[in-house]
Image (cartoon, grey):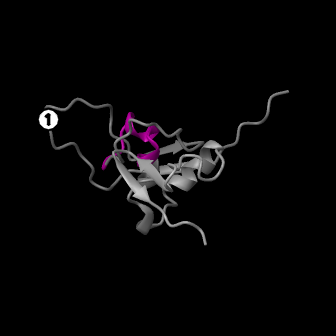
Amino acid sequence: MAWPKPDLGLELVGPKGQRINRPDVQTAGLLSRKRVPLWATPRAQCNGPSRILTERVYRDLPTQLRMERGTPAHLRSGWPNVEWVEWLMGYPRRYTALPDGRWAAGKKVVRRKQPG
């Protein structure tokens, strides 16, 4: 028996008046809205959220975080919290921490306070 697939019903909403300002750039169609059932799987090579919503970028976790209708304005940077991504992927807490208590986040290393 297969487990039922969850559906979070995420609704991604593109910014009003979004457009591509560079005619030399080829991209898939712009989207004003896109419904997705689940958060995307984080990818190591994703360099951050997009400022526009297209058929290609709606699959990126940082873009989903920025464009999701229910994301509070102060969290729309699009950069996921490292601990939340560990939880999303099913990893134990602090699984991705370096031995000195820092997390590798892209090209920079982020220092986190130790719980105390």
Q: Amino acid at mark 1?
A: Pro
Element on which disc 1 rests: loop
Asked which quadrant contains residue 46, the reply is top left
Residue at the outermost bottom position: 116
**Residue bearing mark 1:** 23
Horizontal and vertical percent for residue 3? 79, 34
Out of 78 and 96, give the one closest to the viewer: 96
Q: Outermost residue, right direction?
A: 1
* Numbered range of the magenta stretch: 51-63
| Residue in view at x 23 percent, y 29 percent | 26
Residue 7 inside the magenta-drawn segment? no
Q: Is residue 60 above or below residue 28?
A: below
Q: Residue at x 15, y 39 (%)?
A: 22
| Number of numbered labels in the structure image | 1
Label 1 crowd bin: few (<14), some (14–19), many (20+), radius 10 Å: few
Q: Nearer the viewer, residue 60 or 109?
A: 109
Instruction: Specify whether residue 62 is painted magenta.
Output: yes
Q: Position of residue 29 (x, y in %)?
A: 33, 34
- Residue 67, x across and y down, in percent: 42, 53
Quarter-of-image position of residue 79: bottom left
Residue 49 x %, y %: 36, 48
In the rendered structure, the answer to whether residue 37 lies left or right of residue 54 reads right
Q: Where's the C terminus, which quadrant?
A: bottom right
Question: Is 2 displayed left or right of 12 in the figure?
Answer: right
Q: Is residue 9 visible?
A: no
